[in-house]
Amino acid sequence: MAANFGQRLAKLNPRRVSQQQLMVTIAVVLVLYFIGPLVFVTLASTFRGPPTILPFDPLAYWTLDNLHVIYTTGRLQSTVTDTFIFVIGSVAVSFIIGLALAWLVERTDMPFRNLVYVIVFLPLIMPALVTTIGWIVLLGQRNGLVNVLIRKVLWFWDIDKGPIDPFTLFPGMIFVQGLGGTVIMFVFLSAAFRQMDSSFEEASRASGATFLQTIRRITVPIMRPSVLSVLFLGMILTLESFEIPLLMGSSGNVADILATRVYFALNPVTGGTPLYGEVSAYGIHFLIITYALFYLYARFTRRAERYATVTARGFRPSKYSLGNLKWVAFAAVIFIMFLKSIAPLLILVWASFFSSYRPIEIAALEFANLNNYRIALDDPRFWPAVRNSLALALGAATISVSIALVIAWTTTRAKKNTIWHTLIDLFTSSSLAIPGVVAASAMLLFYLFLSSKFGIPLYGTMWMLVLAFSYRMTLAYRLNRAGIAQVARELEESSSTSGANALTTLRQIVVPLIAPNVLTAWAILFIISFREFTVALFLAPSQPITLGVLLWSYRAESVGKAAAMSVMLAGFLLIVIVTVRFGALKKLARRRG
């Protein structure tokens, strides 16, 4: 009788039962993705044992020695200091460049503004690892193009290398990282300029205020919340940067950054056993800093909505006339973009044709060949790495978007905003605040623990990497949530009234209507996963190998081989972007049109 009653109840309220199942599923997913590994890495910092012993092993014991070690040796203080200098310096560079670009594109009559807007996004096809290797080649002490030009222009004939050494120059590392953060600054600041009513600035100038006075008294106060939010976001993204500090900062002991400190605690230079306790101890401090920055970012993002200046009346931002300087501004923008992405890629293309790097000159062309590409393609690790990278990107993007879609629909369509919905929204959004090195080390410890204690064979498998790659679902969640908010509830209610359950409604009604959001999120996450390096290096430094890890191994063997692999990796990403932009999105537009 009870079974029959349950069946009748399910038939009467299929939507309610399905939503309960969705909530349980979401809770389990959040535990596996975020809460479990993070709680584990926090608790692991309080256990210590003999070498090679994992936290929570019977031989491990509870202690605060891990925290004591990083505090008393002075390593934490020096690490935090270097990290602070690196983050503030890099964000300052990216903010200044991003602000200038956004103002020129949105507020002036600079020519070819739409072209500049497109060019700014080109660096997205370049993985940070590729860009960093490109800059290392550009700054090479003996034959690097930058040093060669400096020696010739400044008449340094008495030296045959330098004067710049990419491995001993902290400002150089900050500059390269700052260039890398320009895109995110430009995106947010250009949106802020676009939404700000320029009549306030016009009124200020009409009253006799100078350009600088208008900027200081009108523009800056109105944009303050947007500026602060993007600064905190830039700090979060810079703080978790790994490739540039690893390649440019660690080799010459230039800087001791939190991200590289965690990596070398897990992979000691001396070849000793991993210091799991210290990894966890550093990870806790890493999380405290990033979550504090995330809180400030979220706070000022909400506050920015109170400063809206777009009204119902005819709103059209006016353009500031640059006069004869508009072509100078355009040339400056093109030069910055050339430094940002084109120069590192071009120097890698050049280096890929030589067994050993040669300066850029006509005489060197007689030694050019395709041997590096042939060696890479004949490498027995190459095609497995391609297949693994594609499979990981496909799996991670699909899982992330699917989970984010269900969570976004559940939280957006909740009839009553309970504490559970708030927590789900918070945890899903806060994946942005989890640095890649912390997520990777947490998942490494977590899956090692599951494998050793419960026999769950995830460690060392493709499934482990897919799950690890797909933890960044903040972007997919926000895009899907924004799309769902624009869909009228009546459409879903009609589907429910006709007898469809929650998943059927989601699949047949909601997803088709927000397909552009879903596809955009999937494409972005596919690109991010395909170019992912940090998580793969932590979890699978040898097998299953990915293109990023293979490139990492090449960089120690030969500049030419690393350059050839970098060019092919950038080419793969370019093909993916073109396919999605001119294939899937146009096909979807025709269907919807």
Image (cartoon, rainbow, N blue to C red):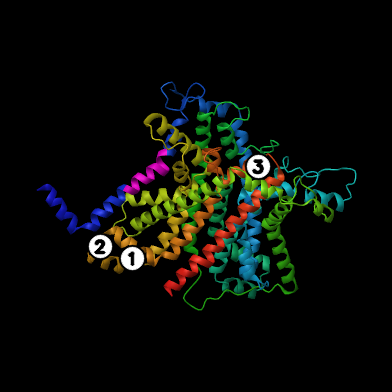
Q: Earlier in the sequence, mark 2 or mark 3?
A: 2
Q: Residue at x 12, y 51 (%)?
A: 4
**Which class describes the residues within 10 Å of circle 3: few (<14), some (14-19), or many (20+)?**
some
Q: Residue at x 52, y 49 (%)?
A: 387
Q: Which residue sits furthest left?
A: 1
Tag 2 residue? 500
**Which class describes the residues within 10 Å of circle 1: few (<14), some (14-19), or many (20+)?**
some
Q: Which one is in front, 359 or 41?
A: 359
Question: Do tag 2 and tag 3 residues touch (Cβ < 8 Å)?
Answer: no
Residue 546 percent across, percent down from the top left: 55, 45
Question: Do tag 2 and tag 1 residues touch (Cβ < 8 Å)?
Answer: yes
Residue 453 percent across, percent down from the top left: 39, 29
Q: Which mark is residue 509?
A: 1
Q: Residue at x 40, y 33 (%)?
A: 450
Going by the image, does 51 lie left or right of 8? Answer: right
Amino acid type of the residue that numbered disc 2 sits on in the rendered structure: Ala
Magenta-colored stretch includes residue 26: yes
Residue 342, quarter of the rendered image:
bottom right
Amino acid type of the residue that numbered disc 1 sits on in the rendered structure: Ile
Q: Earlier in the sequence, mark 3 or mark 1?
A: 1
Residue 497 percent across, percent down from the top left: 22, 66
